[in-house]
Image (tube, coloured by chain):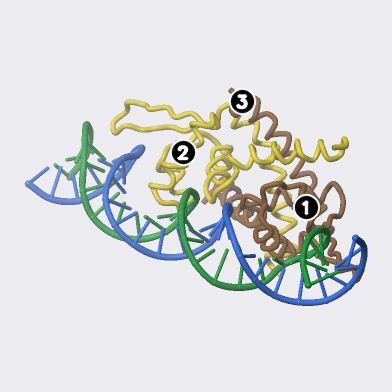
Chain colours: A brown, B yellow, C green, D blue
Amino acid sequence: MNQKQATCQHKLMVTRDALEVIQGKWRLPIVLSLTFGDKRFGEIQREIVDISPKMLSQELKALEVNKIITRTVYDSMPVTVEYSLTPLGKSMRKMLDEILDWGVVFRKEVVVK
Amino acid sequence: MNQKQATCQHKLMVTRDALEVIQGKWRLPIVLSLTFGDKRFGEIQREIVDISPKMLSQELKALEVNKIITRTVYDSMPVTVEYSLTPLGKSMRKMLDEILDWGVVFRKEVVVK
DNA sequence: GTAACTAGTTACCTTCAAGTAAGTACTATT
DNA sequence: AATAGTACTTACTTGAAGGTAACTAGTTAC
């Protein structure tokens, strides 16, 4: 195997790792939402209008397991729970920005035409 | 709705568009593979070792529809078909690089630990 | 006591992405 | 005539992702 092929194989593996997190309909939207500030369960739900509580709960758990977000419970009345990005979550910023930039290009070229 | 909320809503929409293309197990790997040069069906299959011909064929079609790649048939013997990135496909480069960069960070932080 | 707010959970169902295995069509080589 | 190489296609099946609707649990306000 030559250098180019080895590089490609390595990148294919890394892509798979990254896809584990950005895969799915809701994870990127949730992370994006939290880049605008820490939010409570209900706030995220109101922002991502068509997500069900089941999916939101499930995806928040997955993001927590992958150390992208943290969950903090405040014993206010009624109890509130705040979700925020970890440093790892915040490190997604540049990637998110590039996905958004490309999304705009793609939209112009394909979606609206 | 304030400015921040409007911006977030817009970004959520754009994210959805981008996800249409980067969604799925095979699309990003295929695009990545083609950033290393134009390739034939069999070459891609040998590079992405565990993709089946069915999935490869299906995903190549989807990428063609979304104007990410072009398909060129050469009437050599036997017939060969070459796939290459369109300008829109090439415009995914920066996004791919950021996904890869982040993938490396994520791998270090979560996957290997 | 009943409605409303918080943040979820649970059961059930449907749909779609993906996997498996075999087959197709053409040509060239032996 | 049989095998191998090109690039797929087709039929069938499995499993995961996602959707719907109703329900839980604790507290506060009316």
Residue B9 in the image, given as x and y percentages of width and height: 76, 39
Marks 1 and 2, how far apart in space? 35 Å
Q: Is residue A11 above or below residue C5?
A: above
Name the amino acid type tagged 2: Leu
Q: Is residue B49 visible?
A: no
Q: Residue A79 appears in which quarter of the rendering?
A: bottom right
Q: Nearer the viewer, mark 1 or mark 3?
A: 1
Residue denoted by label 2:
B60
Q: Nearer the viewer, mark 1 or mark 2?
A: 1
Q: Is residue B108 above or below residue B83?
A: below
Q: Is residue B90 above or below residue A27?
A: above
Chain under numbered label 1: A
- The residue lying at 75 percent from left, 35 percent from top is B10
Q: Quadrant of the N terminus of chain B?
A: top right
Chain under numbered label 2: B
What is the crowding at mark 3: few (fewer than 14 residues within 10 Å), some, or many (at least 20)? few
Q: Nearer the viewer, mark 3 or mark 2?
A: 3
SS at circle 2: helix
Residue A41 in the image, given as x and y percentages of width and height: 79, 59
Q: Nearer the viewer, residue A43 or A89?
A: A43
What is the crowding at mark 2: few (fewer than 14 residues within 10 Å), some, or many (at least 20)? many
Chain under numbered label 3: A
The dot on residue A44 is 1
The dot on residue A112 is 3
Marks 1 and 3, how far apart in space? 28 Å
